Image: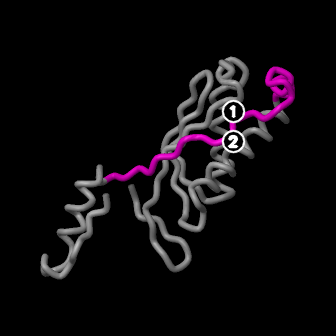
Amino acid sequence: MDVEHAGYSTYRIRYHMVFVVKYRKQMLLKKVPFEYFKKIIIGIGERYWFKFDAIGVEEDHFHIVVGAAPRYSPSRVMQIIKSITAKKIFEDYPDIKEFLWGGNFWSAGGHIDTVSEFGGLEKIKKYVEEQGRNKGQLTLATFV
């Protein structure tokens, strides 16, 4: 994972997000082609400077791995992606709105994980402990 630059900061932030179709309808790949999702995602990435590393679509839910600048909270990233994909899908596939009883495309909420190239908590603690010239200069607190 590369270090990204924004304004006066650098960052390396990635999220794994999962969105679920309203009512868990088994319809994504049947009604909306995968390439269409990919096209929308590329457009979102260009507009908001998000970096998409992976996209996965199943019949009733959607997985992405996305990087975003720290100015965007994870929930804001999710909101942007969900709102734009829903709007575009309803515009280009109007029969889906009827299939979902005229409501929203995505269920409320979703799932977000942070992703790191360094691994789990223990690896991060070890990495932080190894920084600096003197191992005694850094004090770590364990939060339970």
Which residue is painted at 18% across and 82% down in the image? 137
Q: Is residue 32 left or right of residue 137?
A: right
Nearer to me, 58 or 124? 124
| Residue 87 placement: quadrant | top right
> Which residue matches tag 1?
36
| Neighbourhood count class around disc 1 (C-alpha, 10 Å): few under 14, some 14–19, many 20 upward | some
Q: Is residue 9 left or right of residue 60?
A: left
- Residue 126 inside the magenta-drawn segment: no
Q: Position of residue 86 (x, y in %)?
A: 75, 38
Label 1, secondary structure: give it. Answer: helix
Q: Is residue 37 left or right of residue 16?
A: right
State the extent of the magenta-drawn residues as a range: 93-117
Q: Which colour assignment does the render follow?
A: one colour
> Which residue matches tag 2?
40
Q: Position of residue 42 (x, y in %)?
A: 63, 46
Quarter the N terminus occupies: bottom left
Q: Position of residue 57 (x, y in %)?
A: 57, 29
Which residue is painted at 54% across and 66% down in the image? 70
Label 2, secondary structure: give it. Answer: helix
**Is 94 drawn above or below residue 112 in the view shown?**
above
For badge 2, the amino acid type reads: Ile
Instruction: Check if mark 2's residue and mark 1's residue have beta carbons within 8 Å.
Output: yes
For badge 1, the amino acid type reads: Tyr
Quarter the C terminus occupies: bottom left
- Residue 106 inside the magenta-drawn segment: yes
**Disc 2/disc 1 C-alpha distance (Å):** 6 Å
Which residue is painted at 65% across and 58% down in the image? 48
**Is 3 drawn above or below residue 139 in the view shown?**
above
